[in-house]
Image (cartoon, rainbow, N blue to C red):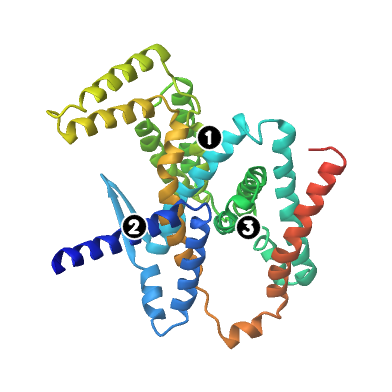
Amino acid sequence: MKTVKNTKDARSFTEVIQSTFQEFFQKSSAAGITIIVFSAIAILWVNSPLSDLYHDLLHQPIDVHLATLTLDFTFEHFVNDGLMVIFFLVVGLEIKREILVGELSSARKAALPMIAAVAGMIGPGAIYLMFNYGTDAARGWGVPVATDIAFALGILALLGKRVPSGLKIFLAALAIVDDLLAVLVIAIFYTSTLNMAMLGAAVIILAILFAGNRAGIQSIRFYGFVGFFLWVAVLFSGVHATIAGVLLALTIPSRSRINVDAFTKRIDRLQTKLAQTDRPQHAETDRLDVVHAIEDACESVQSPLHRIEHGIQPWVSFFIMPVFALVNAGIHLNMTMVGHLTSPIALGVALGLFAGKQIGVFTAVWASVRFKIA
């Protein structure tokens, strides 16, 4: 009896743990909380006696071998230029969906985040130059103009359903336009050399992807395979590799090719078959096979955009983003750092981001709405 009771207690404890995790991951704020937790871990880790292990992790070599192609990364490089491409792919898909059928479907609505993003870059740059104009440091005006889209959207996710969906889409669109503009700034003002051959290859590969879309290709494997080579071309071109994710998102079909009659007949047949598996002579595996067939049938009529977005969103929220936070939030906190906070460069960057960004975005949005520009 005691053994049975212990078994029940153990099972009850396991069920409680499982239900707790399920409830957490179903919350809309779970992704944001996870990012905050991993950011805190990074800060504590890098300021602990184990900080050497943290830096060893960042510089751990990762080699990707594909036929004759070899890509050499450090772990930090792999996360920022590799895994984050998938994050930008998801954000790009969300923006594309909203442009087609959502909050950004009209030119006027789509113009607002674009105007806000431009003003949100001018503000920080102007404040930075106020502190550093006429010095060698003035060339660093590009540092505060960009928002870290990953952390920005992570904090937004932390607020969950308390934030209206329209505001989420506006901020996501603003952040991604801001990031694209930042890449242009870096490419034009801070990149000494661009590999024009690789840029040309990227354009050709992008054209192939658009042609596949126009030809009605619905295969996710096609877009994944060709998209990988788009990423490689962008990576070696000198432009930030994450832009490949946004470009790939633009080519993913947003509509499915569905034969309603064929789909309805297939579902009817599967429903009949499912009802038959309720008989005693049928095993549980027979029932599961039919259920999986119904799932496959329903998935086959969804657009590639919908399938990709919903398929990789959990991986982005609970794996890629936490790893990104762990890699990039490790900041050394010491008295030397405090002393540097009063330098013109530090003041220009800090006030540019905290004041210039807010002033620029708010002023642009207010003026656009007030004068009915957007």
Residue 250's disc is: 1
Task: State which tag comes first along the sequence, 3 or 2.
Answer: 2
Disc 3/disc 1 C-alpha distance (Å): 22 Å
319 left or right of 114? left
Q: CA distance from mark 2 to mark 1?
A: 38 Å
Residue at 48% x, 33% y: name it: 206
**What secondary structure is found at the residue carrying circle 1?**
helix
The structure residue drawn at horizontal position 62% and vertical position 49%, both measured from the top left corner, is 184
Mark 3 or 2: in front is 2
> Dot 3 lies on which element?
loop
At label 2, counting other C-alpha atoms closer than 10 Å, the crowd grade (few under 14, some 14-19, many 20 or more) is few
- 231 is higher (above) or lower (below) than 107: below
Q: Residue at x 34, y 67 (%)?
A: 60
Residue at point 48% right, 63% down? 325
Marks 3 and 1: CB-CB under 8 Å?
A: no
Q: Nearer the viewer, residue 81 or 221?
A: 221
Query: Residue 352's mark?
Result: none
Residue that carries the numbered disc 3 in the rendered image:
147
Label annotation for residue 18: 2
Q: Earlier in the sequence, mark 3 or mark 1?
A: 3
Hey, what amino acid is under mark 1?
Leu
Looking at the image, which residue sits at the far top? Answer: 261
Q: For residue 74, what is the image quadrant?
A: bottom left
Coordinates of residue 65 in the picture (x, y in percent)? 28, 50
**Real-space Cα distance between discs 3 and 2?**
37 Å
> The C terminus lies in which quarter of the figure?
top right
